Image: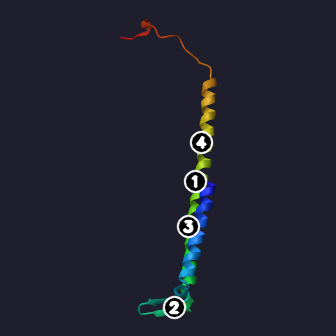
Amino acid sequence: MRFIKVLFLLALFVFSILFFSQNNDTLLQALTLKLEIPYAMTLHSIPLPFGVLILAAFVAGSILTMFYFGVDKVRSAARLKECKTRMASLEQELNYLRNMPINESQPYTADDKTE
């Protein structure tokens, strides 16, 4: 499995280099972002190369994804700890019940019936 991951990352790296080298002119064009808030104001960014914006979006997406999966992992770990504690409690109860002596009263006889 590790070999497949390394091979996938290597392919991703090679394709990224190819993409950036073949689209160098387009990625170096300056782009200004604009946000218009109706009846209030208009905000403009400084001119940035298109490649920087793509890279920033990729990094922001990666960070948000890591945060999402980190929160999910913490929740799963807490749930697993809770389940292990419950399982240990139930195993202890089961062992206690297995080791209890059987107290049988007199066996059931036909004379005890009330009609």
Instruction: Residue type at mark 3: give it.
Output: Thr
- Residue 94 is left or right of residue 115, and the answer is right
Instruction: Residue type at mark 1: give it.
Output: Ser
Q: Earlier in the sequence, mark 1 or mark 4?
A: 1
Q: CA distance from mark 4 to mark 2?
A: 57 Å
Q: CA distance from mark 1 to mark 4?
A: 15 Å
Colouring rule applied to residues = rainbow
Q: Position of residue 12 (x, y in %)?
A: 57, 68
Looking at the image, which residue is at 61% across and 44% down? 84
Circle 4: is it few (<14), some (14-19), or many (20+) Cα within 10 Å? few
The residue singled out by tag 1 in the image is 76
Circle 2: is it few (<14), some (14-19), or many (20+) Cα within 10 Å? few
Q: Earlier in the sequence, mark 3 or mark 4?
A: 3
Q: Are marks 2 and 1 in contact (CB under 8 Å)?
A: no
Q: Which mark is residue 65?
A: 3
Q: Position of residue 64 (x, y in %)?
A: 56, 70
Q: Position of residue 22 (x, y in %)?
A: 54, 81
Q: Secondary structure at mark 1?
A: helix
Instruction: Residue type at mark 2: give it.
Output: Thr
Instruction: Residue type at mark 4: give it.
Output: Arg
Q: Quadrant of residue 17?
A: bottom right
Circle 1: is it few (<14), some (14-19), or many (20+) Cα within 10 Å? few
Looking at the image, which residue is at 42% across and 7% down? 110
